[in-house]
């Protein structure tokens, strides 16, 4: 494996490990300052600060977070990861799961674009009680 490929693999691992651990600052630091984050569920492009805010809420609502069944594929300039984010809703203790695919472009060791693909039905289950 090339040095670049290993660096991208290490970045991807740190990024998802940080979210799993609830370390939003480390997740935020994985992005370039002008990174774009696109969501298939609303087709909007956000930034790293908005993403940090959303994930802070998710960490507050979901315990026992785990990126299960990680399948990471690195390519020149980025990576694709498929996984299932699992956890328990703190509000009612219900187990939740969110299968997804994430495609990232990487430059200078930072994520410059993240495209996330989630099933909207699973997102609704994850976000249940989000406004309580």
Image (cartoon, helix red, strand yellow):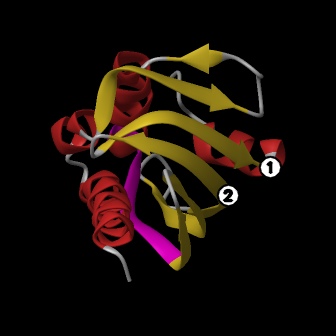
Q: Secondary structure at mark 2?
A: strand
Residue 16 is drawn in which quadrant? bottom left
Give the residue number, with chain letter if any, for mark 1.
119
Please state if 106 lies on the left or on the right of 127 as rendered.
Answer: left
The reply to whether the C-beta atoms of the residues labelled 1 and 2 are less than 8 Å apart is yes
Query: Taking 65 as reference, is 128 left or right?
Result: right
In the rendered image, residue 86, in percent from the top left (x then y), is placed at 53, 67
The reply, left or right, for residue 51 in relation to residue 117 is: left
Q: Is residue 27 found left or right of 113 in the rendered image?
A: left
Front residue of 16 and 99: 16
Check disc 1 and report its element: helix, strand or loop: loop
Q: Which mark is residue 100?
A: 2
Provide residue 37's location: percent of width, then percent of height: 54, 28
- The magenta stretch spans which residues? 60-68
Q: What's the magenta bit mostly, secondary-structure-wise?
A: strand
Q: Residues within 10 Å of mark 1 (few under 14, many from 20)?
A: few
């Amino acid at each position: 494996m090339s040095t670049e490929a290993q660096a991208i693999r290490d970045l991807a691992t740190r990024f998802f490990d940080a979210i799993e651990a609830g370390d939003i600052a480390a997740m935020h630091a994985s992005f370039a300052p002008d990174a774009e984050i696109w969501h298939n569920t609303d087709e909007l492009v956000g930034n790293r600060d908005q993403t940090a805010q959303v994930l802070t809420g998710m960490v507050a609502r979901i315990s026992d977070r785990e990126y299960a069944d990680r399948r990471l594929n690195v390519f020149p300039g980025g990576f694709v990861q498929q996984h299932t984010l699992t956890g328990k809703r703190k509000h009612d203790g219900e187990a939740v799961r969110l299968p997804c695919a994430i495609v990232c472009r990487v430059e200078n060791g930072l994520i410059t674009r993240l495209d996330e693909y989630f099933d909207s039905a699973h997102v609704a289950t994850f976000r249940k009680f989000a406004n309580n």
